[in-house]
Image (cartoon, grey):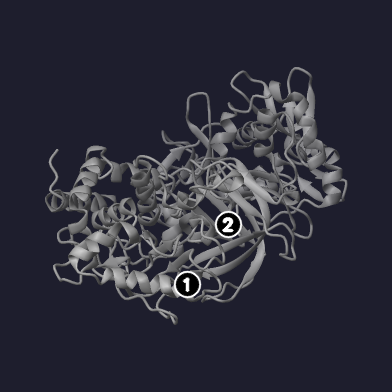
Amino acid sequence: MADSIITKQELVDAQKDAKTLGQVISGDEFSDVISRLGRKYPTLAKMMKILQQSGQRSYANYALFEADKSNIPSNTTVRIAQGENAGLFVWDGANLTKAEGDVVELVNALLDKFLTSEESENLFEWKDNAGNVVLALNQKGQLVSYDEDTKRSILLTNQEDIKELKKFVDELNLNNINSLIKLLDASDSSDLYKFVDSEGSVVLRLTKTGLLRSGQIDSLQYGIDALDYLKPIVKQSDDSKLIKFEDAEKNTLGYVDKFGNWVLNNVDVLNEIIELKKFKNKAQTVTALKQIAVKAPESLIQIYLTEIPTLPGEKGTLVSGKGEFHFDGQSFTCYVQMEVQGASSAAYAKKNWNIAFFSDPALTKPLTIKIGDLLPHDELVYKANWIDHTNIRNAMCYRLWEQFYSTRAGYPRLEVETPLISKKGKDALQNGANGVPRLYSALLYINDEFYGLGSFGTAKKRGNYNIAKNKPKEILIGMDGWNNITNLEVTNPTLYELKAPSSPTIETFNAISGWNAFTQLNDADFALQANTYLNKQNVIDFMIFAEFVKCRDVVSVNSVKNLQFISYDGKRFMFMPYDMDTVIGLEWTGEVVYDDTTGSQTMDNSQTSFWRKVKKTYNSEIEARYKQLRDLKIISVDNIYNLSTDLLLKYPISLYDLELNRWPARPSLNITSLEQILTWTKKRIQFLDTFFNYTA
């Protein structure tokens, strides 16, 4: 459909133009209508008469049609004048379909579904199950919430008008707008909305390409193009927006997207209504806040980044723009700064992105985002999950680790609660740090173009581990390269990032040296010193966790990579999982899935094996903990199924078409799936039951 613009002048006088539109629809088939701006429009009847005459093929009888049908284009109106097959038909390229009724009458009847009567103040109305008008587009071009009892329309098109809505919140009933729900439903069908008659037959379809189609009059589209004032209502672009409202300079005034978000003049209309119904007043403007809190999402997070320049191809280059984020009906807008995230993954075609939040265009005022019970962050990460086309391994394994620590007894339960012990006042309070990323299913659009499916959430920020910025004995090591856990570099690290303290001292490096010395002890001395240098609960859980999912890119005998290594006292160190995409058999390039369900991931039988010493020291506790996790069904195929499907089902299946069109060369596309994950898990548990001496 050709683009159409509603100018600001036309919006102001839309009531007059609505009368012109009524004349276009109701005038006789020989007349034209002159608008207030001097534009000449044929009446709909005249226009459809022309379409009938130009797009129709006539034949004296069926035999002549049969002889010519190979030359007839698809979706052509065919009239057969004589014989038992006489009548009006539509030829779809293979079959004739009877066209019932007069074309002009049919079109007028269908357009009645779009427009209300001349006496109504509204051009378009949505009704609840009781027939009450609850949302309307009035003749001034404004979206209003409509109160049937008081006949009062409440404007929803600017910040000031929406305040009035709080006076009527108890009388609103927006949960039953079935037609609105159907219109916005991005289903598997090629149609966004179907108009049906009293017998349930489809008489008009609004397709995902923005075209109005019907079997009887497929060329109706050309007629609709002449109705300038209908185009903004039915316009469908190829980007994230189903319907866009623009001014003469093509500035976006508002839109409706594929996920049911109504945004007009930067106001998320449906979210405002929900919030007003809940809290009886309007929330403070987002850009005035220093922190935004949203619920932990139960559905897909939608991220729209706009005004973004050319995306960088590697780490180190920052780009900025605007961001709009939708969480289960809650939304916020802010300014953003982006950078490629990840080490080896930075070379992938589809990038991970660090996204930092600001409340001002100069990017001087950081804005923190609190999701559910998590620590507020001023930067979150979009994970592209390039090598894992299921998009679940990373997020699923982090949730599995959270299940591990949720079953612990006593206090501190979490590793990151350790520094709270013996503290008083504010310093003794939990703050939402949990020591592991939390990722949610998400999709990303950049400059209104689909970028991809992925995950969105927290990463490996220092605050999430409750590590001070610059205390010599509070240490956070990010294992960016492969390191020997029994011989970490001291004073000049090149294979890992010393993320804290920011200015390490001799105490810091003495702590790392002390760790190395402990790990190199013989079995007997190692066992004697274990509780001094290890957090027993942490090392047992991490070993079982690593063995269960077999994280190939995190630990392999004495070699470690990607995991976060922390200490709060410069003596006792703990292992925290990170980078969980190469698990459950998936190789690091994503091009191979291994049936590596047997054998230990953490230990061998050498005398220098760190994990062998751990298992020997804590063997009875390890076996008891494994039994507990098995009996609680945390280590089970069913649990992996539940965790996986909870993430997978957040992505509408239709979005995978967009994903594969945008990224057709996903490396693991044809080798991993939910079935592969579950089959691998079943075999792995069978091995581990013997390895950890499990009996039900």
Residue 233 position within the rendered picture, expressed as x and y whole percent measured from the top left: 67, 44
Residue 455's disc number: none
Q: Residue at x 59, y 27 (%)?
A: 175
Instruction: Measure how far apart labels 2 and 1 are at the Cα level.
Output: 55 Å
Q: Residue at x 52, y 40 (%)?
A: 185
* Residue 632 left/right relative to 512: left
Q: Nearer the viewer, residue 444 or 130?
A: 444
Up/down of 200 relative to 502, above or below: above
Name the quarter where the C terminus is drawn.
Answer: top left
Q: For mark 1, give the secondary structure.
A: helix
Residue 24 position within the rendered picture, expressed as x and y whole percent measured from the top left: 76, 40
Q: Which residue is mark 2?
A: 239
Up/down of 1 relative to 407, above or below: below
Name the quarter where the N terminus is drawn.
Answer: bottom right
* Pointer 2 or 1: first along the chain: 2
Q: Which residue is mark 1?
A: 507
- Residue type at mark 2 is Asp
- Residue type at mark 1 is Glu
